[in-house]
Amino acid sequence: TGQPVLVGTVSVEKSEVLSRKLQQRGIKHEVLNAKQHTREAAIVAQAGRIGSVTVATNMAGRGVDILLGGNPEGLARSQVLKEGHHADTLLDEFALPLPLEEMPIDYITARRKAHERLAELVREFSKVCNDEGEKVRALGGLYVLGTERHESRRIDNQLRGRAGRQGDPGSSRFYLSLDDELMRLFATGALSWVMGRALPDDEAIEAKMVTKAIERAQNTVEQRNAEIRKNVLKYDEVMNEQRKIIYQRRDQILSGSDLKAAAMEYLADAVDSLIETHCVSEADDEWDIDGLVIELRSFWPHGIAAESLAACSSTDEMYDLVMADASVYYEKREAELGAPTMREIERQVMLRIIDQRWREHLEEMDYLQEGINLRAMGQKDPLTEWQREGFEMFGALMKGIAQDFVKYVMHVQVVRNDQ
């Protein structure tokens, strides 16, 4: 009959399958999906012409009205470009790199000619589109055909709302199958019985029970999606606190502030962590002094004897002894390299270690989140477990950053290029 048709699909893949079937039947049509985003406004604007068939995904191109009979300005622009005018001459003034009066004279002249021709063609096409619009209205306006119900009723309504805009006539109809994902996952057995009855293929099933069942299925999906979004926010709160701490450290480094205090803090963290690892027991005769001496040597070439550490009456006394040696060695390194060079080394090393460790931590947190819901099988709250383990992993991250920093800074060798 020539009535324009807008066909809605729920995915790009399904729109392309439908497009191939239309091509096989020799039906001329336009496909509007994510792959056509540069042309979507032009395609939507002309979807109301006589005989037009437009296949759209999730009603892409929102914000552009489908004018019955076509959009005269859109047609005029296409014609201007076909006649050889450059697309840049049709740009809005705000999109130009310079104020119009400061643009090259050749561009201003070409722009004036293009706009004069555009205005002339808009007048011509306005009459054509108005006449065609009347014919389309007589045919019943735009016909919207939904190939499947979307998970969200809102998107169904957006597609349906393309017909009958601004007082124009129009109609819409959705076609369902028990193989549709929404029906397969959420439809009830009673609905399957109704739709599975031996009815002719072209007979419409418009029972209220079918409509209600679809609404219930859509509500179920929307509630599930809302719950997922709520959980994502709760889980991200943990990551957000961690991000703030890491980014604060990075900002410190990038702003060029003196990092010596932060460097000494990392040094203290590393020493504290090592003593805590090797001197767990309250009884000093169970402390692993030899292991501590060996591991401290991997951080810097200290001169602390095992006997000196064993003579300490508490871990606090041991910490003071080790920190004194570490501080002396750090100052010695600074004297050798010079304060400006030492500050630059601190900055480069700290930034590199934070970035590398943070990337690894994000991957580990993603891995943890993937399996955290299985904790519910052990009668544990997944969110609480995520918060607890995330806190422990972040503690390990900060400890690792401190230890890596001390190792690199204490051992780094500076090579000077003499020109």
Image (cartoon, rainbow, N blue to C red):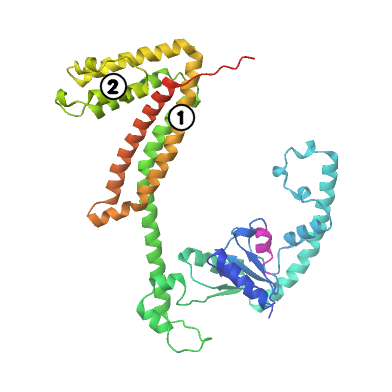
Q: Secondary structure at mark 2?
A: helix
Going 43% across and 82% down the picture, which residue do you hit?
195
Please determine whether, in this image, residue 354 is positioned above or below residue 370. above
Looking at the image, is mark 2 or mark 1 nearer the viewer?
A: 2
What secondary structure do most residues of the magenta stretch adopt?
Answer: helix
- Horizontal side of 109 relative to 241 (left or right) equals right
Tell me the amino acid under the disc marked 1.
Arg
Q: Quadrant of the C terminus?
A: top right
Disc 2 target residue:
293
| Numbered range of the magenta stretch | 39-48
Tell me where residue 171 appears, x and y as whole percent. 57, 75
Q: Residues within 10 Å of mark 2 (few under 14, many from 20)?
A: many
Tell me where residue 167 appears, x and y as whole percent. 61, 69
Q: Quadrant of the N terminus?
A: bottom right
Sequence-wise, which precedes: disc 2 or disc 1?
A: 1
Q: Residues within 10 Å of mark 1 (few under 14, many from 20)?
A: some
Please determine whether, in this image, residue 178 is positioned above or below residue 98. below
Which label belongs to residue 340?
none
Please determine whether, in this image, residue 369 is positioned above or below residue 340. below
